Amino acid sequence: MAKVEIYTKFLCPYCHRAVELLRRKGIAFEEIDITMDAAKRQVMIKRASGRTTVPQVFIGGQHIGGSDDLAALDGRGGLDALLGAA
């Protein structure tokens, strides 16, 4: 299965929604909290092509986007396909 990484911040409702979607589907993931870590935030921004909002989700190193992007990918069956392809 592809490595799943999600950049989050404390008390972010969109982050919570994305994390819950991953948990509900039983997907193992690495959560990277950038709340108090400017260095990790800069890494996220670089990896996400300048996007500064959280969450930012990566699957197999590929940038997926935020919470809405992850939900849309799952809704059209692309999340399972992407995880299974890796």
Image (cartoon, rainbow, N blue to C red):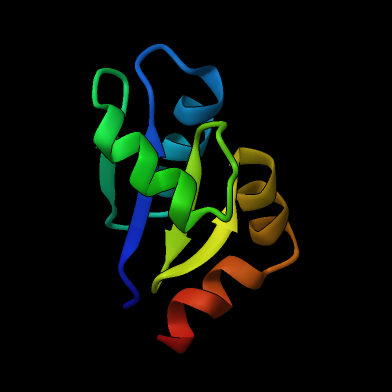
User: Percent position (x, y) of residue 5?
Assistant: 34, 54
Residue 16 vs 36, above or below: the answer is: below
Front-most of residues 81 and 40: 40
Front-most of residues 52 and 73: 52
Give the residue drawn at x 57%, y 66%: 79
Residue 8 vs 6, above or below: the answer is: above
Front-most of residues 67 and 39: 39
* Total residue callouts: 0
Query: For the N terminus, which image quadrant?
Result: bottom left
User: Percent position (x, y) of residue 47?
Assistant: 45, 57
Give the residue drawn at x 27%, y 57%: 28
Give the residue drawn at x 26%, y 36%: 39
> In the displayed image of the protein, which residue is found farthest to the top?
11
Give the residue drawn at x 50%, y 36%: 55
> In the displayed image of the protein, which residue is found farthest to the bottom?
85
- Which quadrant of the view contains residue 23? top left
Query: For the C terminus, which image quadrant?
Result: bottom left
Is 4 situated left or right of 57 in this image?
Answer: left
Residue 17 vs 70, above or below: the answer is: above
Is 45 situated left or right of 29 in this image?
Answer: right
User: Percent position (x, y) of residue 34?
Assistant: 31, 29
